[in-house]
Image: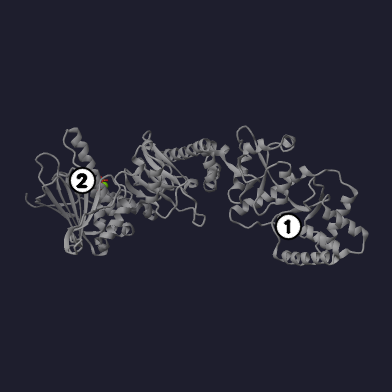
Amino acid sequence: MTQRKGTISVQTSDIFPIIKKWLYSEHDIFIRELVANATDAISKRATIARTQNQEIPEGKIEVKVNKTKKIITITDNGLGMSEEEVEKYIAQLAFSGAEEFVKKMQDSGTETNDIIGKFGLGFYSAFMVSDKVEVETLSMNEGATPVHWSCEGDTEYLFSESKKETIGTTITLHINEESVEFLDQFKLSATLRNFCDFMPYPILVSDEEKTTETVKDKDGNETQKAIEPTQVNDTTPLWRKDPSTLKDEDYKDFYRKLYPMDGEPLFWIHLKVDHPFTLEGILYFPKINRNKPFNESNIRLYCKQVFVSDNVKNIIPEFLSLLKGSIDSSDIPLNVSRSSLQGDPNVRRISSYIIKKVGEALKKLYKKDRPRYEQIWEDIGLFIKYGCVSDVKFDELMRERVIFKNSENKYMTLTEYAESIPENYKEKLKDKIIYFEKDKSDYSLKSELLNEKIQTIEIDEYIDPHFIQHVETHKVGDKQFSFSSIDSEIGNIFEEQNTTESDVKIKELFSNILYKDVKEDDPTRSDIEIGNLKNSSTAAYFKVDEQMKRMANMVKSMGQDTPFPIKKTLVVNSSNALVQNALKISEKGGNEALVEKICHHVGDLALISSEGLTSENKESFVKRSQDLIQELSSQLI
Ligand code: ADP
Ligand code: MG
């Protein structure tokens, strides 16, 4: 064959500098593109060989570096190309694809980052790192002649003779000054591992200049030993395998390999579907690291085992963004901008399929292994509730399976809660769920309730305010629940309603003492009410307005300060001995100081068992406690 020059027919003559500039930040994708092409070529060869009943060679991709010559070669034993094919696919098609790509980039203006590297560029990306690219190839077609093609990154190229004897293609990259880092075998291997970690044929990396190493044998003699190329990929990722052949240990091993710094995964889902779209993958529920931001994505997206992106925002709904693992689908459009991904029907279908699968898997776990479900609830609960609030389908699957810790630290669903209410209270508490806020609600009331065998459920301050609101507008099973904080009006269920003469006196006494120096309209001033609790051990508690509290919680869960103080009422228990003593001493007269101390103490006790004392309150509380005990003990001496 004689040499032949050709011209690339592109209209955008400055295409090379544009691509180099735009893609600079992601120029390591060249390796993915070239290895992906090699992979395609190998599987195409296998398909053709099969139809022709030919022998199918074992596919293999060799990547070699040579620092001195500044070259990287990528060799495959795929189907190869004839001269016409190189002309058509490499010189014209690949280039026109690149041209189209550049046009898109120019049109889209600011969205460059979104289009970059999503399979729009292919072979062309080789020029991002090379001054010159050579293709040497021998087609699998009978009687084919080998071809050599080279191009120095402008619109001219050259065909020349080749002596290639084996079927397949070798791409030689003459690495440019800015990209010499890739000539380092370790850097190259790391890049390959990132982009090609699960490509379907072995990728073997070697350094042409380091083919042997010196080793000492057991007698201490030095001998030369050949260095074997290192394989950088795992050709059969777990998601490709048949789930029925896999054991828990296989899933855990795979997880460890992907996330060596993590502990064990809690739970996983193996996705497999081939109609109406293709999707394979494994999603893991990790143990949540509460110190790490939630919004970073840990799911890697593949297309036929070729790594595409670790941004799966539009495919995985936000509430599942805590999951880790891989998704492999050839039906996700890769070369379009991300904003249009959202509208893509396949992406929407895939997304709802994933949501459904995750929901079903959790439902199954709930049914089959409730203890395990409860064991991991701490980690999965947050996103299950988040999922219920944000996705209708997921909500349908999981709403009834959301569990809460009760006052005895056992988990129960809302339906189980309703069933646990003792018969004599069922009518009074009709489908009302009493909740308790950790570090905020009055725990003395919690034990009051427990005395009556009424549980309370514990809620958090992040997602539960939203979840509660959601449940109040959606039935759980056939029940329409409503919620009441333990320290809201619900406290009334223990009180006997008739007010006695001494109740009036107690109220007066406490108001006069506690709010002696506080103005009527001071927002810190609470109303005082007299309650007559069945259980006399609680001296007083704070009752809050349910609606106001909810509003405040909502505001807080969105990370803002409450703009208003929540109205509280101090309920003083007239059946409590301490309260009664205060009244008696005061009626006897002559020891006002002690009465004052008791009243303030009762007020502080109510604070302590709910939100806790403020720092000023704390000081006076400590001093008063000292005084009181001292007074008491000195009387006994
Ligand atoms: P795409 O892979 O999206 O088709 P590329 O620009 O990556 O676009 O490649 C263009 C074409 O060049 C391929 O479709 C294929 O026909 C041919 N090609 C590229 N690399 C190889 C290879 N290693 N072996 C055989 N054909 C190849
Ligand atoms: Mg390609």
Secondary structure beneath label 1: helix
Position of 65 compared to 465: left or right?
Answer: left
Three-letter residue code for mark 1: Leu
Crowd class of label 2 (few under 14; some 14 to 19; many from 20; radius 10 Å): some
Which mark sits nearer the N-terminus, 2 or 1? 2
Residue 388 horizontal side relative to residue 171, left or right: right
On screen, 101 above or below 420?
Answer: below
Q: Is 49 placed above or below 190 here?
A: above
The label on residue 607 is 1
At label 1, counting other C-alpha atoms closer than 10 Å, the crowd grade (few under 14, some 14-19, many 20 or more) is many
Marks 2 and 1, Cα distance to the nearest angstrom?
78 Å
- Which of labels 2 and 1 is toward the front? 1
Beta carbon of the mark 2 residue lies under 8 A of ligand 1: yes
Residue 153 seen in the figure: no
Residue 191's spot in the image, x, y percent? 30, 56
Toward the front, the furthest residue is: 219
Quarter location, residue 239: top left
Query: Residue under circle 2?
Result: 89
Q: Which of 224/74 is in front?
A: 224
Give me the residue at 65% from left, 56% from top: 562
